Image (cartoon, grey):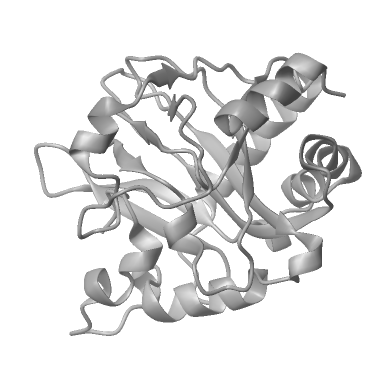
Amino acid sequence: MIDAAKLQHFHAHGYLHLENWLDSSEVAAFANWTAELEAWPDTPGRWMRYYEKAPGGDSRMLARIENFLPHHEGIGGFFQGARLKRLLEAVTGESFIVFKDKINLKAPGGAGFTPHQDGPAYVGFGAETFVTAMLPIDPFTVENGCLEMARAASTNQVLPQNPDGTVRQDVADSLEWEAMLAKPGDLILFDSWVPHRSARNQSSSRRRSYYVTYNPQAAGDHREAYYARKRELFPQECERKPGVDYAKLGAQFNLANPFD
C-alpha cells in the first residue's frame, strides 16, 4: 500500500503525496458527487456552507462545505472505508477515525490561505494527533493556488504565531515550501503540525479539494462535539443570530481562512 521511501518522507516532513491512488471510475464518481454537494441548498442543522467575498464587488462565492459525510453515502463510504483506514494505519501505526470533513471550492479569484498549522484549530477536543487526507477534484497548479507544504517543519509543536493564530511571517519566510502539484486521483496525507498555505486562484477554473481530518481511535470519537461547538460559535450564515460577532467568537474555527 505504501513503500518505504514514502513512509520515510511522511515521518521526515509530516506529509506525503500518493499519485494515482484512485482509478478512473473513482475519479469520475468523485466529480459527480462533488457536483451534487455544490447543488445542496443552505440548510440549518445539516451540512454547513461558507462563503467569501468575490474580488472587485459585493457578490459572494461559495468557498467551503463541511459536515457532509453523514449526508452522502458515496463520499462518506470512501472516507470512512477500510481502504483509507488501512492506509492511515500503515503510515502511522495507529487506527484512526474521522474528526471533521470539508471541501474547499476555491473559485477563480478565490482567496488563499495564509501559512498555518492545523493543530491550534483542534485544541480542546480530546485528541492531540490528527492526520488529514486531501483529495483533489481539479488539477493543482501554481496559478490556481495549489496547496504548499513546508519541508522538514513538522516538529510536534506550535510555531511562533501572529495574534490570529497563523504562522508568523518571519518564520514562514524561513521555511522551504513545496508546491503540491497534484491531480485528480492523487491523495495527499499530512499531519496537524506541518505548516501549509496556498495562494489566490488566479486561473479561470476552480480548484476544488476535499480535506478529511482523522484522530486516533484510541483518543475517542469527537466529531459530533466538534460540529456542535462550531455550529454554536461559527455557524453558516443561515444559522447566525443578528448582532453576534462570529469573527471574534469563532476565531478558532476560521483560522487562516478567507471566509465571512
Return the x and y of residue 32 as percentages of the image width and height: 66, 33
Quadrant containing the C terminus is: bottom left
Q: Identify the residue shown where x is 58% and y is 16%.
A: 183
Q: Identify the residue shown where x is 56% and y is 28%.
A: 13
Residue 250 in the image: above or below residue 91: below
Asked whether, in this view, residue 109 is left or right of residue 16, the answer is left
Residue 54 in the image: above or below residue 145: below
Note whether residue 259 is visible: yes
Q: Nearer the viewer, residue 29 or 69?
A: 69
Residue 146 in the image: above or below residue 162: above
Quadrant containing the N terminus is: top right
Q: Quadrant of residue 86?
A: top right
Q: Identify the residue shown where x is 57% and y is 40%.
A: 210
Asked whether, in this view, residue 21 is left or right of residue 49, the answer is right
Asked whether, in this view, residue 75 is left or right of residue 86, the answer is left
Q: Identify the residue shown where x is 61% and y is 62%.
A: 128
